[in-house]
Amino acid sequence: MTSLTPGSGAPPALFTPLELRGVTLPNRLVVAPMCQYSVTGGLVGDYHLVHLGRFALGGFGTVVVEATAVTPEGRISHGDVGLWSDAHVPGLARIADFLHASGAVAGIQLAHAGAKASSHRPWEGGAAVTPEDALPGEEPWRTVSASPLPTGPGWPVPHELTAGELAEVREAFVAATRRALTAGFDVVEVHAAHGYLLHQFLSPLSNRRTDAYGGSREARWRFPLEVVEAVRAAWPEDRPLFVRVSAVDGTGGGITLEDTVALARELRARGVDVVDASGGGLGGWEHALGYGYQVPFAAGIREGAGVATMAVGLIVDARQAEAIVAGGLADLVAVAREAQEDPNFAVHAARDLTGSHDTYPVQAGPRLGRRRELLGTLGPWTGPEPVQVGRS
């Protein structure tokens, strides 16, 4: 295992590059997609430029734009980012350009919410929008899914997608993939987790179909794999493709880790480079919680399917993240809430693991290094006096 002792000379595993096809990720820290519910008509602007750009300045090797709807009906809420039209490309291109200029790889997650669509923003309650409680100009729309099963109490019964409609959704993913290329992204991630449309097909909790897209495990996989195949075909050979999965459903009777390992083998065979191993989204959450609680999913998939994985789930410390990569549990570590808590998590991790400020932006690193040396000579501030100056 790589040394965690600053100044030991051994580079931390967390800060070694990773080559995926023709793209080199400068380090193993990724900002996971984080829905902000803060746009109109799917169009990103200054908020998203600053929100995502700060993570690149904070040293993350890869920054992934939040779940981006491939159709208007695929949005979780009216505030979701979209890529269903060419009008969405310029704003996203601006973000990709800034990420590149700041040394980060630019990723985007393509998604369809299915039965979880047409909801209020989380701070508005997160429930399904109804005609009675819709905000002005934000009327509800018909939701769709693998089967006509509501996502929960008080939610509408979704329309069961026909075979022809499935083809339309698949082509919407393809069109969004091509727009992501035009916008300059390096990585596309297909969202097949967290109870959204592709997960609704994968899980026996939500897929009760009796046609070729339901029934056996392999039949439930059929539509998500068709989407992945189509996206891979539209995405350049020299650019990596990620897929986010819920490795387990939240409750019994759903997807198991064994199921997901088998699915990951199929994903790898179809040209997927990284499986982003999350969990839950259907059936609540009946599993253990704790620091790194989903890391075993990434480790199990990596070992069982022979595919690179990305670990998530209450990863909050540089030493924890280093141990995941150095110990071979995953190839990448993704953080979301921790990145919001500390947008400089990556440069802080490098500082803590190496004792150096070299990974900071040049505008800050040298000054902070000198400041650190000065603070070392002064010792900690002990208070309560605000001014503590020694004799010269």
Image (cartoon, grey):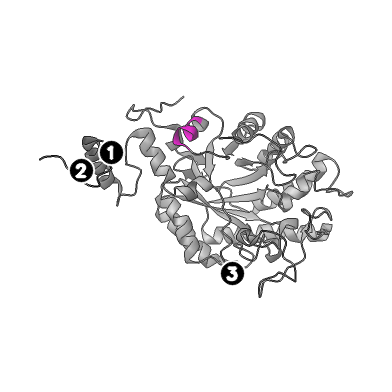
Can residue 17 be seen? Answer: yes
Q: Which residue is mark 1?
A: 382
Residues tagged 1 and 2 counted as in contact (Cβ below 8 A): yes
Q: Is residue 193 above or below residue 9?
A: below
| Picture disc at residue 40 | 3
State whether the magenta stretch is mostly helix, strand or loop.
Answer: helix
Q: Nearer the viewer, residue 77 or 94?
A: 77
Q: In this picture, which residue range is highlighted in magenta?
A: 317-323
- Determine crowd level at label 1: few under 14, some 14-19, many 20+ residues with C-alpha closer than 10 A: few
Can residue 31 be seen? Answer: no
The amino acid beneath tag 2 is Gln
Element at label 1:
loop
- Mark nearer the viewer, 1 or 3: 1
The amino acid beneath tag 3 is Thr
Q: Which residue is mark 2?
A: 388
Whole-angstrom CA distance, mark 1 to mark 3, is: 49 Å
Closer to the chain start, of discs 1 and 3, is 3
- Quarter residue 140 falls in: bottom right
Whole-angstrom CA distance, mark 3 to mark 2, is: 51 Å
- Quarter residue 80 falls in: bottom right
